[in-house]
Image (cartoon, helix red, strand yellow):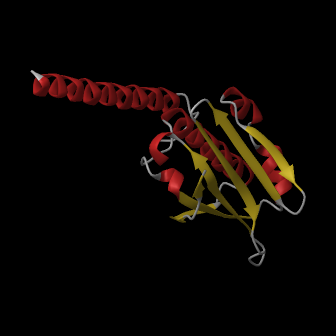
């Protein structure tokens, strides 16, 4: 009887997880369809994104960001003196902070690095709502670069960050 109860509880937990992932995937598909986010691998948030572009400076990128979509998803943003833009999302049970920073100039190109620097979530994982918001944010940054420079170059690398 006890084993049957354990088996039933385990099956229920697995079903809840599967339904949550399917719902998340459906949400992402609908956001991709309207251009609010991109279809990305689930671990994209663990990567550092490097942009090389002739956009001039990071002020231009910040001005080109679709701040309406950021507000729609609860992402707080702000320009920091010294050439960086900070982003913060706090939800019940999860949050992340990230930054877009201008790196050393590379000839006539502006090189910027974006990455999630800290996050919190259940069991040390990114909460699904935070994951969607992080995708929307990265998409908005990419769109700003491509709007300003259609030949912007984007690469991704493994990032270092902290959970808190």
Residue name at image x 37 percent, y 32 percent: 21
Left or right: residue 67 compared with residue 14 = right
- Given residues 104 and 96, the one toward you in this image is 96
Left or right: residue 136 compared with residue 58 = left
Q: Quadrant of the N terminus?
A: top left
Return the x and y of residue 119 as percentages of the image width and height: 59, 48
Left or right: residue 149 compared with residue 9 = right
Return the x and y of residue 8 as percentages of the image width and height: 18, 23
- Given residues 92 and 143, the one toward you in this image is 92
Residue name at image x 80 percent, y 48 percent: 62
Residue name at image x 52 percent, y 40 percent: 131
Going by the picture, which residue comes out furthest to the front? 2
Return the x and y of residue 36 as percentages of the image width and height: 59, 33
Q: Is residue 46 above or below residue 25?
A: below
The part of the image, by quadrant, that contains residue 106 is: bottom right
Going by the picture, which residue comes out furthest to the right? 81
The part of the image, by quadrant, that contains residue 51 is: bottom right
- Given residues 153 and 83, the one toward you in this image is 83
Q: Is residue 164 above or below residue 156?
A: above
Q: Is residue 119 above or below residue 102?
A: above
Return the x and y of residue 97 as percentages of the image width and height: 68, 48
Count of marks, rendered view: 0
């Amino acid at each position: 009887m006890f084993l049957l109860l354990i088996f039933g509880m385990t099956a229920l937990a697995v079903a809840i997880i599967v339904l949550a992932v399917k719902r998340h995937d459906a949400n992402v598909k609908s956001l991709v369809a309207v251009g609010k986010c991109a279809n990305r691998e689930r671990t994209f948030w663990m990567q550092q994104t490097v942009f090389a572009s002739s956009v001039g400076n990071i002020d231009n990128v910040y001005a080109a960001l679709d701040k309406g979509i950021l507000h729609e998803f609860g992402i707080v943003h702000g320009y920091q003196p010294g050439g960086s833009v900070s982003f913060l999302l706090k939800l019940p049970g999860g949050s992340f902070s990230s930054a877009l920073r201008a790196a050393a100039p590379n000839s006539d190109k502006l090189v910027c690095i974006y990455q999630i620097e800290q996050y919190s979530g259940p069991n040390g994982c990114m909460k699904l709502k935070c994951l969607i918001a992080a995708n929307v944010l990265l998409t908005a940054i990419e769109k700003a670069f491509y709007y300003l420079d259609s030949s912007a170059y984007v690469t991704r690398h493994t990032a270092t960050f902290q959970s808190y």
